[in-house]
């Protein structure tokens, strides 16, 4: 761009246009400079307000390692849950697209039920209500089943998040599959492929490019929603912050700190997401 | 007289109704012998594509019987055997579309070997060897590892033809293979189709490419309103058609 303006004679841009181009370029620079300044001022304001509030930074620093140690759980929960959600969403999407009435109705109910109830309720359902179901089943003669239905906090949380996100992602995957031109299916069928082969070899590899960006968004949302497992006493980020804050009557410090940690994690993930998207866009040129 | 061999493609009394009452095909019959090249002509909406797609069951005929190389399917048939027969017919039938429909995530070569490997379980080495032969035959050896988006329309269609030929089909179906192409690219595709006809492939083509219809086809069939109005040799159809409708249509495209 700049090179073009500097060597106008080479590409034959008339003089008036050159002035305009230069002005546009200058405006852009001024804008981005102003934007940076605004961000900077905003950051300064935030920091000063924290100082004015009289935050106990020494206290924060002291507990920082302990709180951060909880991010391991956060990542573990988010990672396992998103993996489960990916599997469920592919199955769910195929179910939603299925012509088999039983399969279709199960998939549709799954999506509707999960999307229609609060995640918080679902989390408690897996953790607190499931054992009761086990107990009831035990009453019907399924001895020993209650133990299977009584889940420790961590698996219960992973299941709750995975199943919930799986339902939302089902619709993403379904949309991705449906976005592939019908001509692709026809070409595959005309070739003699079965429905399964068509999906596996032709449709899915193309749909995955459409699906990956929204899924990485979901992963970022999952990092934050994983804080819900703190409700069951898993020692992840937010649970640690809340505990420590309460015990020392310094909740403000702890909450601000944990909020910043989440924020930093999400910014980091966004950075990777952009990388992935750029990488995929580059592959797109091949398409 | 010697033993009469079965036609390669035989459709009997094919009806197709879309939705609740759009009667697109009304009792179409056809018999195409081995090695014959048939061109189907007709106005837009007359049912040419629908008929072609009924042959390999991309469209389900509402009534009638399809027979390809001795595999017979009745429209009413249900069950597992039918599914097998449909796959059987598709394995013997190559099809080329107006929009090419190459797989965009695969290179030219990968497009061509996909069928042999996935559908026929052929060994990759063998599939590649034959695919290279086909690429050479359609004149695209140097585009072997190119993705479809980097190919011109004419090149894409030639890869698509090679892809359909990779399974060594008994019949080739063409549905307006050149009508999405810029005029200067039509020739290279028609040329490939012509060579295919010369090599003895059985071809059913919907195409308004006059050179192909006139000089390559053994028989030209005119469709109107869901059935044939007339058929005959190209000379007969182009020079001395029997029906007014044929004359009108030809006046329109000539
Ligand atoms: N899937 C479908 N659902 C409903 N109607 C359809 C469908 N496919 C085709 N038709 C209708 O059937 C009729 C015949 O269509 P067809 O595509 O076979 O015509 P065609 O002779 O190939 O025309 P063209 O030269 O424009 O390709 C048209 O009226 C079309 O609208
Ligand atoms: Mg058509």
Image (cartoon, grey):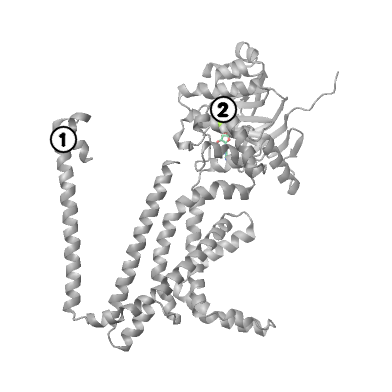
What is the secondary structure assignment of the residue under circle 2? Answer: helix
- Which quadrant of the frame does ligand 1 lie within? top right
Q: Chain of mark 1?
A: A
Most distant residue in the top direction: B239
What is the distance, in whole Å, between disc 1 and disc 2 at their CAs? 50 Å
Residue A252 visible? The answer is no
Disc 2 is attached to a residue of which chain? B
Q: Dot 2: few (<14), some (14–19), or many (≥20) neighbours within 10 Å?
A: some
Residue assigned mark 1: A18
Where in the figure is residue A82, as x and y percent of width and height? 47, 65
The quarter of the picture where the C terminus of chain A appears is: top left
Quadrant (top left/top right/bottom left/bottom right) for the N terminus of chain A: top left
Q: Is residue B73 visible?
A: yes
Badge 1 density bin: few <14, some 14–19, many ≥20, Cα 10 Å: some
Is the residue B66 above or below the residue A156 in the image? above
Q: Is B68 on the left-hand or right-hand side of B208?
A: right
Between residues A221 and B229, which one lies in front from this camera angle? A221
Percent x, y for residue A115?
48, 66
Which residue is drawn at the image coordinates 45% and 55% (left, top)? Answer: A212
Identify the residue position indicated by label 2 in the image.
B136
Mark 1 element type: helix
State the residue at coordinates (28%, 82%): A62
In screen coordinates, is A117 left or right of B11?
left
> Image quadrant of residue B16?
top right
Query: Which label lies toward us, 1 or 2?
Result: 2
Could you say where residue B78 lies in the image, as x and y percent from the top left? 74, 47
Give the quadrant of residue A69.
bottom left
């Amino acid at each position: 761009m700049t090179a073009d303006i500097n060597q106008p004679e080479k590409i034959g841009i008339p003089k008036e246009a050159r002035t305009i181009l230069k002005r546009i370029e200058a405006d852009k620079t001024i804008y981005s400079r102003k934007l940076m300044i605004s961000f900077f001022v905003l950051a300064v304001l935030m920091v000063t307000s924290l100082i004015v509030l009289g935050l106990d930074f020494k206290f924060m620093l002291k507990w920082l390692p302990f709180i951060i140690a909880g991010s391991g759980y956060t990542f573990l929960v988010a990672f396992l849950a998103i993996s489960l959600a990916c599997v469920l969403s592919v199955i769910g999407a195929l179910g939603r697209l299925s012509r088999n009435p039983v399969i279709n109705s199960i998939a549709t109910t799954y999506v509707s039920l999960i999307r229609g109830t609060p995640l918080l309720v679902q989390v408690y359902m897996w953790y607190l209500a499931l054992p009761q179901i086990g107990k009831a089943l035990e009453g019907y003669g399924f001895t020993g089943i209650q133990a299977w239905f009584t889940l420790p906090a961590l698996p219960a949380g992973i299941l709750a998040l995975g199943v919930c996100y799986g339902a939302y992602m089902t619709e993403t995957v379904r949309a991705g599959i449906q976005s592939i031109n019908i001509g692709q299916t026809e070409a595959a069928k005309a070739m003699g492929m079965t429905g399964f082969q068509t999906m596996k070899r032709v449709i899915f590899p193309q749909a995955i490019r459409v699906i990956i960006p929204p899924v990485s968004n979901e992963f970022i949302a999952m990092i934050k929603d994983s804080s819900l497992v703190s409700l069951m006493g898993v020692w992840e980020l937010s649970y640690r912050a809340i505990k420590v804050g309460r015990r020392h009557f310094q909740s403000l410090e702890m909450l601000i700190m944990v909020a910043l940690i989440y924020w930093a994690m999400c910014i980091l993930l966004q950075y990777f997401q952009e990388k992935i998207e750029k990488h995929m866009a580059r592959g797109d040129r091949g398409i | 007289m010697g033993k009469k061999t079965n036609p390669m493609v035989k459709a009997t009394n094919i009806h197709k109704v879309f939705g609740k009452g759009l009667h697109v095909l009304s009792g179409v019959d056809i018999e195409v012998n081995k090695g014959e090249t048939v061109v189907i002509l007709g106005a837009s909406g007359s049912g040419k594509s629908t008929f072609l797609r009924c042959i390999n069951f991309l469209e389900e005929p509402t009534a009638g019987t399809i027979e390809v190389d001795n595999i017979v399917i009745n429209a009413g048939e249900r069950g597992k055997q039918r599914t097998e027969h449909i796959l059987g017919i598709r394995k013997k039938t190559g099809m080329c579309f107006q929009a090419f429909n190459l797989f965009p995530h695969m290179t030219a070569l990968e497009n061509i070997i996909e069928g042999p490997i996935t559908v026929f379980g052929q060994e990759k080495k063998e599939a590649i060897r034959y695919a290279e032969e086909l690429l050479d035959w359609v004149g695209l050896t140097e585009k072997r590892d190119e993705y479809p988006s980097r190919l011109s329309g004419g090149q894409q269609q030639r890869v698509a033809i090679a892809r359909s030929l990779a399974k060594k089909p008994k019949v080739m179906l063409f549905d307006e293979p050149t009508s999405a192409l810029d005029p200067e690219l039509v020739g290279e595709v028609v040329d490939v189709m012509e060579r295919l006809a010369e090599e003895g492939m059985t071809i059913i083509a919907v195409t308004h490419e006059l050179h192909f219809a006139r000089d390559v086809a053994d028989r030209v069939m005119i469709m109107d309103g869901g059935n044939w109005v007339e058929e005959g040799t190209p000379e007969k159809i182009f020079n001395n058609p029997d029906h007014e409708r044929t004359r009108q249509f030809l006046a329109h495209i000539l």
